[in-house]
Image (tube, coloured by chain):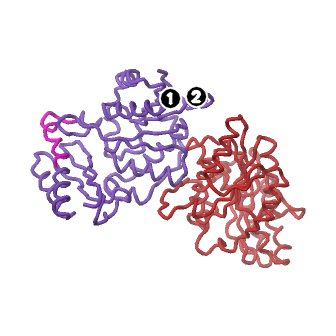
Chain colours: A red, B purple
Amino acid sequence: MKIIHSMGSVRQTVLGWRRAERRVGLVPTMGALHEGHASLIRRARRENDEVVVSIFVNPVQFGPGEDFSRYPRPFVRDAALCRREGVSVLFAPKPSALYSTDHQTWVTVEKLAGPLCGPFRPGHFRGVATVVLKLFNMVQPDRAYFGKKDFQQLRVIEQMVNDLNVPVKIVPCPTVRDPSGLALSSRNAYLSPDERAAAPRLRRALRTAGQVLKSRRNVREAQRAARNELRQVPGARIQYLEILDPKTLSVPKKTGPFLLAAAVYVGRTRLIDNLLVRGAL
Amino acid sequence: MKIIHSMGSVRQTVLGWRRAERRVGLVPTMGALHEGHASLIRRARRENDEVVVSIFVNPVQFGPGEDFSRYPRPFVRDAALCRREGVSVLFAPKPSALYSTDHQTWVTVEKLAGPLCGPFRPGHFRGVATVVLKLFNMVQPDRAYFGKKDFQQLRVIEQMVNDLNVPVKIVPCPTVRDPSGLALSSRNAYLSPDERAAAPRLRRALRTAGQVLKSRRNVREAQRAARNELRQVPGARIQYLEILDPKTLSVPKKTGPFLLAAAVYVGRTRLIDNLLVRGAL
């Protein structure tokens, strides 16, 4: 496995692969890799000849009060995981190489960035769309892999790729969970033992909502049931809990499909999760 | 010369060239081709193995009161010019293929879109940056050719390519003028004979400003001289006449270089032109 820090060098490497007609998969990450990332890498390996993992904690997708500076950066451990998983290139650009002092170009996906995390993380999806497009342009992969855990992010990227005719196939991958049902996230590392014990109840509340939705066919009742369940979790605070159309992220059709998505603070740590309920209830 | 309307087909053609290691130049246009476009095509032919000319009157870069519907579309004549100039592919996508009904992704170049045409054409450079990036993604050229007549557009595109790491080399090309000094533009076709006679005075006023700038080394005096000259042109109305730093499009350094740029209505027709004055006067 090669560790590459410069754009010129990653381009050169990919150009060599391309000349040999080798297919290239990209797994863009912010590091602090866990089994969720490992599953993306394995899928990318199955579907491509070469796999690039990028690690970049993207400053422009963090808000002023957010956890940019304390975001975990265990580079040596991340590199070991990538090596173990058969990654060809670990691409770790420096922030100064990605954003010049006069950087002023932004990619915005307007409607899809509006709901859910949108109001609580202004500028977040603009930062995500911009850095993902930059990484696509630097690496020029055939396919790129994203987890469904960050569902709104996935939809924003799919829409961007479609609207801008970006020649990259986006591959959505299932959320990986620990045995308690908690969705794996680099931010789970922030949780105290008590918070860690409470965290799986986010997933359970979403499943309750899913069951109510199926049995009662009523979005408001389903939402209420999940909110009630979450209110009983000590130290938890709901930021949002919404039931939306998974394609448009707006009001769902009566017959579905439905995206049940929530952001919950457990202590100081913000967790998100979601559940898809198929259509035609 | 092949005439292609679909993205899939243009991608297939370019992919074949790429496999044969042939270099590809793109000349993005809105059609109504004139000798200025022909000069871009010739430059592209000299520097590449294959040349694609795109013709697309991009609705999203026109404002509500602007000339989108009456913009000239002489496709047969344009195709003949391209054939004569040895173009490999004329790519003419349909608006419905470029913008889906739920298109919502925009590329904005913030600072550079602010001055000059910015306040008078809100959304214009967002529309330009977005469509140019789409064309780059569809055609994936090695190089793309733009005239310096639309200087702010050129700077916006250069900045976008740099900020988003777009793997395309931007080649700026000199403005082509008719013997009177009038910069060639598809919009010159709108001019009545009297307006056509008055139009070259835009260029002359910019040159006067350039001379005053060199002799007096004073931006305000230079500006005033050009404005005074333009005020004497019957039927002309100055929209802006600015002297800026050509890189940042903000206040120029005392030693230059200087961009002298103007937009003037001659009758109902809006003409732009500019002049570069090198630094260290």
Q: Position of residue A142 (x, y in %)?
A: 68, 41
Amino acid type assigned to the residue bearing label 1 in the image: Asp
Above or below residue B104? Residue A67 is: below
Q: Secondary structure at mark 2?
A: helix
Q: Secondary structure at mark 1?
A: loop
**Residue beneath label 2, please?**
B17
CA distance for labels 1 and 2: 9 Å
Nearest to N terminus: mark 1 or mark 2? 2
On the picture, is B169 further left or further right than A88? left
Q: Position of residue B118 (x, y in %)?
A: 35, 55
Residue count near mark 1 (Cα–Cα under 10 Å), binned few <14, some 14–19, many ≥20 = some
Q: Does residue B228 show up magenta in the picture?
A: no
Give the quadrant of residue A216.
Answer: bottom right
Residue count near mark 2 (Cα–Cα under 10 Å), binned few <14, some 14–19, many ≥20 = some
From the viewer's side, name the closer residue of A199 and A154.
Answer: A154
Res B49 label = 1
Q: Position of residue A255 (x, y in %)?
A: 71, 46
Which residues are the magenta region?
Answer: B190-204
Chain that bears disc 1: B
